[in-house]
Amino acid sequence: MATADDQNHKDAEPREPVVEASVEVTEEEYLEEEYLDEELDGAAAEAAEREKVRAVLDRLSSSLVGIRVHDVIIKGNTKTKEELIEAEVAALLRAAPTVQDLLRNASIACARLRQLDVFDSVDITLDAGPTELPGTTNVVIEVVEAANPITGNAGVYSKPEVGSTVYD
């Protein structure tokens, strides 16, 4: 039996993203689900929400889920040009074909923006894309710019003199 050490990942065939063929939900099913959510009390609603999250995590861990970035939205930049932020991360985020790749690339993009030393904080959120475009997401980048991003040191050099001078 071959182990992970015996396999060369470069020789492996690329995995194709799995995209569900029918994701549409009828209006009747939607209203029924909404009605059921209203009927649940606090503990039951919390348990139902936990089950939904568990189902999403199980799906993400068991198979590749295809996704496409519809838009990159940047918030919080007042001094930094939006084009600079997009130049650093937009291509990386748009290149991800699956949710798993997008999560990985969003982490890399966040690190890249933090390394610029221009922002106090950087948050990247994956938001639902437009309803008319299923399988899409909007990437929202929220930044908090540093109060004074320019820092520096100054020094003075003087040649040693033959005599010494005392200042009082």
Image (cartoon, rainbow, N blue to C red):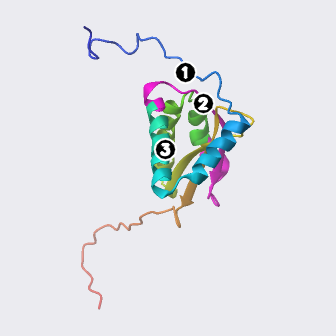
- Looking at the picture, which amino acid does disc 3 mark? Arg
Q: Nearer the viewer, residue 160 or 83?
A: 83
On the image, the x and y values in percent for residue 53 come to: 48, 42
Q: What distance separates the C-alpha of mark 2 from that of mark 1?
A: 9 Å
Which labelled disc corresponds to residue 168? none
Q: What distance separates the C-alpha of mark 2 from that of mark 3?
A: 22 Å
Q: Do callouts 2 and 3 mark residues in contact (Cβ within 8 Å)?
A: no
Relative horizontal placement of residue 141, taking residue 49 as reference (left or right): right
For disc 3, the neighbor class at 10 Å (few under 14, some 14 to 19, many from 20) is some
Q: Is residue 156 magenta?
A: no
Q: Picture quarter containing residue 158?
A: bottom left
**In this view of the protein, can residue 45 be seen by the observer?**
yes
Please name the residue that numbered disc 2 is placed on: 67
For disc 2, the neighbor class at 10 Å (few under 14, some 14 to 19, many from 20) is many
Question: Earlier along the polypeptide chain: callout 2 or callout 3?
Answer: 2
On the image, the x and y values in percent for residue 68 come to: 63, 31
Which labelled disc corresponds to residue 17? 1
Q: Please name the residue shown 75% across and 36% down the image.
A: 132
Relative horizontal placement of residue 123, taking residue 71 as reference (left or right): left
Considering every residue shown, the one lying at the far bottom of the view is 168
Question: Earlier along the polypeptide chain: callout 3 or callout 1?
Answer: 1
Tell me the SS state at disc 2.
loop
- Figure label count: 3
Q: Please name the residue shown 25% across and 8% down the image.
A: 1
Query: What span is in magenta?
Result: 59-86
Please name the residue that numbered disc 3 is placed on: 112
Q: Is residue 63 magenta?
A: yes
- Looking at the picture, which amino acid does disc 1 mark? Pro
On the image, the x and y values in percent for residue 91 come to: 60, 34
